[in-house]
Amino acid sequence: MRSSGSPFDPQLAHTDIFTFKEDGDVAGVPVLRYTAKKARMVWPREVIPVSGWYSDTATMLFGGYVTVRSLPAPELCWALQTAYGQQWASLDGSGKRIVDFSCARHSTIVEGESTGKVLHSV
């Protein structure tokens, strides 16, 4: 049950849980892959480099409230490039260059003033 209307309520957990296993390599880099067949079918190129998985040097803020372990920057960039291509940080899902990054900084969802359109804001 939600305690507020916000999907980013800090008292609620909002995450999907996927299990991984060490499974082969990509371009000579040992990787972990999803264990669930459906997840591998939906996201066939999403892999995690084994070296980054076992590193405990990097953390990030998840959901704006909780610090979690993360892949170190070199392994994270490699994983994103492997899954989404060399331009992963500059193109949207349609291949158009991203120039407005404001939605990437959101920590709450607010309703648009007159349009009712859902906007992301800082």
Image (spheres, grey):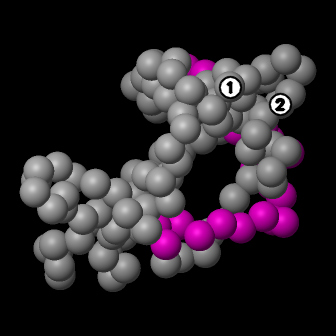
Quarter where residue 12 is shown? bottom left
- Quarter of the image with the N terminus is bottom left
Crowding around mark 1 (Cα neighbors within 10 Å: few <14, some 14 to 19, many 20+) is few
* Spatial separation of the CA atoms under disc 1 and disc 2: 23 Å
Q: Which range is magenta?
A: 43-64
Depth check: give the residue in front, 5 or 119. Answer: 119
Mark 1 vs mark 2: in front: 1
Q: Which residue lies furthest to the front in this view?
A: 114
Residue at 21% x, 52% y is 118
Instruction: Answer above or below: position of 111 versus 22.
Output: below
- Left or right for 83, reference 58: left
- Quarter of the image with the C terminus is bottom left
Examine the rendering and report whether any part of residue 37 can be seen. no
Under tag 1, what secondary structure? loop
Q: Earlier in the sequence, mark 1 or mark 2?
A: 2
Under tag 2, what secondary structure? strand
Residue type at numbered disc 1? Gln
The answer to whether residue 44 is magenta is yes
- Left or right for 47, reference 39: right
Residue type at numbered disc 2? Pro
Q: Where is residue 14 in the image (x, y as percent from the top left)?
A: 36, 63
Q: Name the residue under label 2.
A: 30
Q: Name the residue under label 1.
A: 87
